[in-house]
Amino acid sequence: MLRWLIGRPDHDEVRLPALKAHHESSVSGLYIVGDLAGAPTIRAAANQGVEVMAHIGSLPDARAEKESDVYDVLIVGGGSSGLAAAMEAKCCQNLRTLTLESGRLANTIREFSKGKEIYAEPKNVAYHARLWLEDSVKEELLAKWDAQLAEEDLNVREGVEVTAIRREQGCFSIEVKEGTAKDGDVVRARRVVLAIGKRGNPRRLGVPGEDLDKVAYRLYDPDDHKGENVLVVGGGDSAVEAALALAEVANVTLSYRREGFFRLKSRNREKIDAAIRDGRVRPVFSSTVGRIDDERVALQVGDKTTDVDNDWVLVAAGAELPHKFFKKTGIRMEKEWTPLRALTFAGVFALFWLFYAAKKYPPLWPHSAFDLGWNDFNFGALHWWEWFTIAYSGAVLIWGIKALRKYWYSKFQRWKYASVIFFQCFMLCILPLFILPRFAPEWYAKAGYAFHLILAWPLSIEAISKPLLAGHMGPFLYAVGLTFVGIPLLVYFQGSRFCSWVCGCGALAETLGDNVRHLAPRGPKSIRFERAAGKIVLGLAFAVSILTIFFGSWAVADEGLHLYGIWIDTMLAGAVGLGFYWFFGNRAWCRFFCPLRMYMNLIGRIASRFKIVPARDKCIACGQCSRECQMGIPVMDFAKRAEPVTLKTSSCIGCGICVDVCPVDVLHWTEESARAAEPAKLKE
């Protein structure tokens, strides 16, 4: 079931190395910065390089003996993060470093097309690196960097490939190979910083003829292929932009494995559709390359093979991470399952089942088999589960303050975290445990109606039936009004923000679970499971509520309520809700099983003003928004297509993290703000 729940990752999802504090990998002393560490812009990547070197420089054993052949730090990669790290190490930290680059320094930028615009985003983040950075074009940026690197006189070797990294006798031994040489050297360093990015390993086709000189993975200048028959392989923005540029001077055929384009930037979609209509680009959808010859390329379309005349092939099918190198080095990836992780997951889940079974239904196993006496545990005037409520609220408060500090730059996040702290700590803890027992009528306090002030039906299955059957009309009318008037109005104006601003389950997810939101299952299978499971649980909640209200004296009603309490409240909301946090993200209960979330989503599909609006043609396809979405929504696909995220098309709960982590200010809450953020062409 878990394999089906997780499914395959999104086509856009890239699982990055798992990092600890200060960007340290699972290999002690080996740090990862830049695009490979979730920093997709030059500004963010350079800042990471500075941060890591500042941390290494502060360590007591950072510097080796001056006469030693061991470097303090070896930097692998000469992009923005690697160069910024090298400058920080030399000028500010007094560290002996060596920077190795397999190609040329700033190789990724050098491979950009001529006149490529480069933005110094995000502008709201302070820039700490010495490396020059302003809004510019490729040629200006490289000229500035080349001049600056000449002045800095860094210890750099270009054209050197790192083939292996091993930790030996308290330092690293790094095997390197220069150019086409068969034999390599060994370099030793106390610490290693990997700054290799994600774009240096283009995805290969794996077909006969791919090693011919006419096959390339980068387009430098379209004029080099004037009058040629060109095949472009791929259907993403890079492939389409290359095809459009080549179509001005060459005969272009575009091969794409899917039935049509589906994740292009809106403007690229308009341009490629026009080029296809005009006959400037010939698309071959649902096709793969079968063979590449000197003068032709064989395209496989279903059961048929089509030969097309060809002079040059551009493969623009994305890039792959060097997983074999990572595995050989011992670098663990995010969401990577090992026997130890599986055993830990089983233990954590069992622990939370034990706890929640005792809290809600002590007759359940193992409490039914062993007299553990949980119901007799009292501390002072409070029962043990009331102390649990206090501890739960304390966790929300502590990690909520941490989240406030983390996202203080965002006014939206400041209000959100203040809201979840208030509702959990006051409305769901102080008010029902300390204020109402003292000042409210005894029947009200003992019935626990204070929790129903916030926890509407169907999240609280007895919010309506309990006061109705007890004859308490005030709480009954309040619950009905909250469920069928308050919640729909909230959804209409604010979407499902109840989950991220008010709910107690969401409060812990937004605070304690903030650092694991990227572990959420992704892909079409998990989305289908989400929709099916949510509707099933909502249907069960409705059926049990009807039984309880109209047939409360029947044994079947009590049994239905009991079973719902066991499997939904205890197993899913409790054991799954918390036990899955560190393995499948912080919203396993909220996303897949919570009936109130599904109820709000169904309302939102009928009528809701809520939406997240992307600025047209500004997305850089870094994937940060999708990666940080705790609900597994492929936000980047919406951003690239310039389509708003709504409750009709997603399970968005309005937490706003995707808006605030976007490095280039693509996502906005209003159409006016999104239009104002649309890019203007740089003046050369």
Image: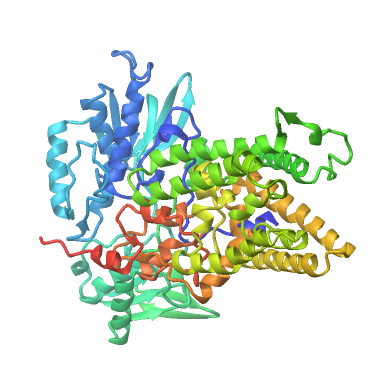
* Residue 271 x/y as whole percent: 28, 77
Q: How is the image coloured?
A: rainbow
How many numbered markers are drawn? 0
477 shown above or below 657: below
User: Which quadrant of the figure contains the C terminus?
Assistant: bottom left
Q: Work out whether residue 160 or residue 551 is closer to the camera in this orientation and state it.
A: 551
User: Which quadrant of the figure contains the N terminus?
Assistant: bottom right
Q: Is residue 331 visible?
A: no
Q: Is residue 21 left or right of residue 375?
A: left
Q: Work out whether residue 449 or residue 439 is closer to the camera in this orientation and state it.
A: 439
Residue at 55%, 71% (x, y): give it.
Answer: 603
* Residue 257 x/y as whole percent: 47, 72
* Residue 419 x/y as whole percent: 46, 48
* Residue 541 x/y as whole percent: 71, 64
Q: Work out whether residue 64 or residue 615 is closer to the camera in this orientation and state it.
A: 615
Q: Is residue 399 visible?
A: yes
Q: Is residue 276 left or right of residue 490?
A: left
Q: Is residue 468 left or right of residue 581?
A: right
* Residue that extends furthest to the left in the rendered view of this protein: 684
Q: Is residue 509 left or right of residue 624?
A: right
Residue at 87%, 34% (x, y): give it.
Answer: 371
Residue at 17%, 53% (x, y): give it.
Answer: 135
116 shown above or below 399: below
Residue at 57%, 45% (x, y): give it.
Answer: 336
Q: Work out whether residue 613 or residue 88 is closer to the camera in this orientation and state it.
A: 613
